[in-house]
Image (spheres, grey):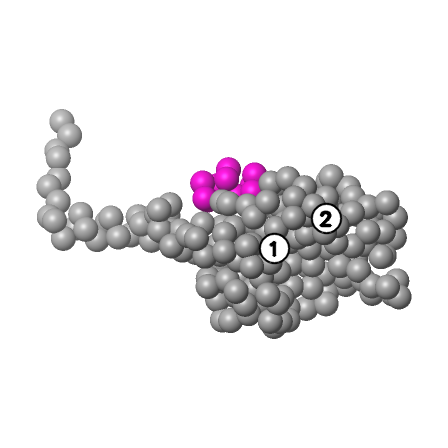
């Protein structure tokens, strides 16, 4: 015969707190993750070797969103197609939620064709933590040079009330990095790293 053990309200509460601590904050308490594919529409961004930045950023952002949604994280996008969105409007998407973080995705360019690597920008303390979590994971998954995490008063970042970071995923002016950025498998690798960094920052 199985004997049933009775629990006090205090024991039940302590157990509930422990379980919640292990699982992390409830879904409703997590911020919405706003993904911002750089450029779009009449603004192509960088264009080298027949590759347009606006197309790459959208593909990477869509992959990031898929990873996050599979984890039950709420997402939004500043654009889902090839259309122009002003910098102020991009920040406004994030500011339209009670609690949101914004991650802007870009690809770099150097007219001298010399620079290579990844770098991540931020503003504010919360933005710094978000940027660091993302950047270190991208650095682990790529052999591209690490150009570091940098504070920068970019419009889309400084106009966003919540945590915000901007990721430069590589230089399109570098033939080797442009080939990587155009690869679906590499885009997925970047997306996984960005999503992992975002997820870690929400804990």
Question: Residue, x 68% and y 52% (percent of image)?
Answer: 39
Mark 1, Cα crowd under 10 Å, few <14 / some 14-19 / many 20+, is few
Q: Nearer the viewer, residue 89 or 180?
A: 89
Q: Nearer the viewer, residue 137 or 177?
A: 177
Q: Secondary structure at mark 2?
A: loop
Q: Secondary structure at mark 1?
A: loop
Q: Name the residue tied to disc 2.
A: 42
Question: Residue, x 23% and y 49% (percent of image)?
Answer: 15
Region in magenta = 65-74
Residue 190 placement (x, y as % from top left): 67, 49
Quarter of the image that includes the C terminus: bottom left
Q: In the figure, 165 relative to 29: above or below?
A: below
**How far apart are the two marked residues, 1 and 2, measured between alpha carbons?**
11 Å
Residue 96 in view: yes
Question: Residue, x 62% and y 71% (percent of image)?
Answer: 152
Residue 17 placement (x, y as % from top left): 26, 52
Q: Name the residue tied to disc 1.
A: 86
Q: Magenta stretch: residue 91 in it?
A: no
Q: In the figure, 122 relative to 100: above or below?
A: below
Residue 63 placement (x, y as % from top left): 62, 41
Quarter of the image that includes the N terminus: top left
């Amino acid at each position: 015969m199985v004997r049933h053990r009775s629990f006090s309200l205090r024991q039940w509460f302590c157990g509930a707190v422990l379980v919640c601590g292990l699982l992390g904050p409830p879904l409703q308490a997590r911020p919405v993750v706003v993904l911002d594919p750089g450029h779009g529409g009449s603004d192509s961004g960088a264009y080298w070797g027949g590759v347009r930045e606006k197309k790459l950023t959208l593909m990477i952002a869509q992959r990031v969103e898929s990873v996050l949604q599979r984890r039950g994280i709420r997402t939004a996008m500043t654009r889902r197609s090839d259309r122009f969105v002003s910098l102020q409007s991009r920040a406004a998407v994030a500011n339209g939620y009670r609690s949101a973080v914004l991650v802007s995705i870009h690809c770099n360019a150097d007219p001298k064709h010399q620079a290579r690597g990844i770098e991540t920008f931020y503003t504010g303390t919360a933005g710094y933590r978000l940027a660091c979590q993302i950047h270190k994971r991208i650095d682990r998954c790529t052999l591209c040079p690490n150009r570091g995490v940098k504070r920068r008063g970019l419009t889309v970042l400084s106009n966003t009330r919540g945590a915000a970071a901007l990721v430069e995923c590589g230089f399109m002016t570098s033939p080797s990095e442009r080939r990587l950025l155009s690869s679906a498998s590499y885009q997925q690798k970047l997306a996984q790293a960005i999503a992992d960094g975002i997820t870690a920052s929400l804990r």
